[in-house]
Image (cartoon, grey):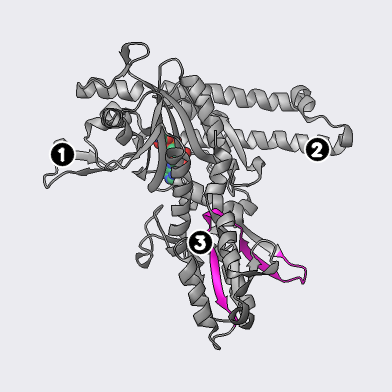
């Protein structure tokens, strides 16, 4: 990570802790690695992200329904899904630093470095040629760029082959050949590459033997697959249709770092869309479009997103792409869109002996549906929102303010109601306003410190509107609204305030942009 990226992430971590968004888990015991607790404001933000996702998926599609499956599942589930045999990471240790890495991540980071060199060439050339610079032409014809692209292709091709064939010896050779060094020790003193299964296991009941071994689910998707028939039959669902779910997943991640980006306990928002075989690639493209639209409706700069098509397809996929977000650590996966074929349902059919098929009345025949999945990490989405929103602004009077300019519909607190003084009936009037607003909006009351300090506190937690109650309010039922982003103020009636908050903070106005 670059120094600025590192600094930015540190700022987010400390801001999240200071204001009650995210705490290290069991901190009084010095925390537990890669596990975090969401505090009072983080929980609100997380809930608002979940609502945005759930409403856009379930409420806005009459052919998508939601479920909430158990975390524990029959162990055969994970045999069928391939997780027992294939949910492994290829690991390599550096003998000098004793640090453990994923071999594929080391290689991908090396590729990123080469991409960085291409970017540098572009910047240099753009400076040299000025207004007449044509980037596309330069990328196609410049010999240095071509050499770098050839290198990237060679590494990607070899990496894909070795990963597919589980050729761990060749994977290590490639790392050595490229001269990849340990970021900590700087040495090339590597162990062999080994496979490591990422599932956590425990025992059901009191007897610890292998037949009682169960797993904490590493993805929520399988809870959907095993309920495919239950939902299809009881909901009288017709293909194409989807099942959505939000829930916890667990992975014994080796490189668990970068705050809530990669955790051992995290939350996923997944949707499996069941389609007629042969139509899956069209649906895959449709869901790619729909999902990027969902992200962009947040209003963040479009350049912070990009698609990354997978080189190494997971054991169940015939097409897969990530939506990557420009996190402080660079572009990283935020969401996966996978065309999972009929792999999961067929595997469950085989292992359970139960038919996992759909009778298609149009074709008058039964088949195992194909599946297109969208899978987004809720915690990563949370980090994306924080990364985009936490800014330090220099003001005209040369002072600074820290502001979390979260989209208003996601903000944990929609309005802070602030009596100008603690006397003359102003606190009572402020509480009266909160009692009116609280059914629709999460509000906060604050009477401590100067009004300026209170504004700053609300800026730091992302409250889009501060409502100040003063002596005039007692006379004419008007208040001052102060806008977080522009810091401008205006006088409005309490009734108009209620309407304005609805227009500016109700998720429905963002959802309306997603109507297909
Ligand atoms: N059902 C498919 C599946 O689980 P995945 O790409 O392994 O696919 C989907 O995970 C999403 O879950 C990722 O895009 C990421 O946002 C999130 N995710 C995966 N592992 C995570 C972790 N250790 N910590 C936080 N989020 C994670």
Left or right of 32, for residue 202: left
| Secondary structure category for the residue under label 1 | helix
How far apart marks 2 and 1 lie (CA) works out to: 62 Å
- Label 3 or label 1, whichever lies nearer to me, is 3
Residue 16, numbered circle = 3
Q: Are marks 3 and 1 in contact (CB under 8 Å)?
A: no
| Secondary structure category for the residue under label 2 | helix
Left or right of 404, for residue 257: left
Residue that label 2 marks: 124
Residue 49 lies in magenta, yes or no? no
- Label 2 or label 3, whichever lies nearer to me, is 3
Residue that label 1 marks: 212
In this rendering, the answer to whether 485 lies above or below 87 is below
Classify mark 1 as within 8 Å of ligand 1 or not, answering yes or no.
no
Magenta residues (range): 394-420
How far apart marks 3 and 1 lie (CA) works out to: 40 Å
User: Which is more toward the observer, 108 or 300?
Assistant: 300
């Amino acid at each position: 990570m670059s120094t600025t990226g590192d600094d930015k992430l540190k700022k987010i971590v400390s801001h999240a802790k200071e204001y009650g968004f995210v705490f290290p888990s069991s901190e009084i015991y010095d925390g537990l690695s890669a596990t975090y607790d969401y505090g009072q404001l983080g929980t609100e933000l997380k809930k608002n992200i979940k609502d945005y996702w759930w409403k856009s998926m379930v409420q806005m599609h009459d052919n998508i329904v939601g479920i909430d499956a158990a975390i524990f599942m029959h162990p055969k589930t994970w045999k069928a899904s391939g997780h027992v045999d294939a949910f492994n990471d290829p690991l390599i240790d550096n003998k000098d630093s004793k640090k453990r890495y994923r071999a594929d991540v080391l290689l991908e980071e090396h590729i990123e470095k080469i991409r960085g060199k291409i970017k540098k060439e572009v910047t240099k050339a753009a400076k040299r040629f000025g207004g007449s610079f044509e980037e596309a032409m330069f990328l196609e014809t410049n010999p240095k760029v071509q050499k770098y692209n050839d290198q990237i292709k060679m590494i990607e091709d070899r990496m894909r082959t070795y990963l597919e064939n589980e050729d761990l010896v060749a994977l290590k050779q490639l790392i050595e050949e490229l001269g990849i060094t340990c970021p900590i020790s700087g040495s090339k003193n590597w162990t062999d590459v080994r496979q490591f299964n990422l599932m956590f296991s425990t025992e059901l009941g009191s007897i610890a033997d292998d037949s009682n071994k169960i797993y904490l689910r590493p993805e929520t998707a399988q809870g959907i697959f095993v309920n495919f028939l239950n939902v299809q039959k009881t909901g009288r669902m017709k293909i194409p249709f989807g099942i959505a779910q939000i829930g916890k997943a667990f992975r014994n991640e080796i490189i668990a770092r970068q705050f809530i980006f990669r955790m051992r306990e995290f939350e996923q928002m997944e949707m499996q869309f069941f389609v007629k075989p042969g139509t899956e690639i069209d649906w895959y493209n449709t869901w790619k479009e729909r999902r990027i639209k969902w992200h962009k409706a947040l209003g963040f700069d479009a350049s912070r997103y990009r698609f990354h098509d997978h080189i190494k397809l997971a054991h169940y996929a015939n097409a897969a792409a990530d939506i990557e977000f420009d996190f402080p650590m660079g572009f990283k996966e935020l969401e996966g869109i996978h065309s999972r074929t009929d792999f999961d349902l067929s595997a469950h059919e085989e292992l359970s002996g139960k038919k996992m098929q759909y009778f298609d009345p149009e074709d008058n025949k039964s088949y195992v549906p194909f599946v297109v999945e969208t899978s987004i990490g809720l915690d990563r989405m949370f980090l994306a929102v924080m990364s985009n929103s936490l800014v330090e602004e220099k003001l005209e009077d040369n002072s600074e303010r820290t502001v979390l300019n979260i989209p208003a519909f996601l903000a944990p607190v929609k309005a802070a109601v602030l009596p100008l003084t603690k006397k003359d009936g102003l606190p009572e009037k402020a509480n009266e306003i909160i009692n009116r607003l609280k059914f629709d909006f999460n509000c906060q009351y604050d009477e401590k410190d100067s009004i300026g300090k209170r504004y700053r506190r609300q800026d730091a937690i992302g409250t889009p509107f501060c409502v100040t109650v003063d002596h005039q309010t007692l006379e004419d039922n008007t208040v001052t609204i102060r806008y977080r982003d522009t810091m401008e103020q205006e006088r409005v009636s309490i009734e108009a305030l209620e309407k304005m908050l609805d227009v500016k903070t109700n998720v429905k106005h963002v959802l309306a942009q997603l109507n297909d």
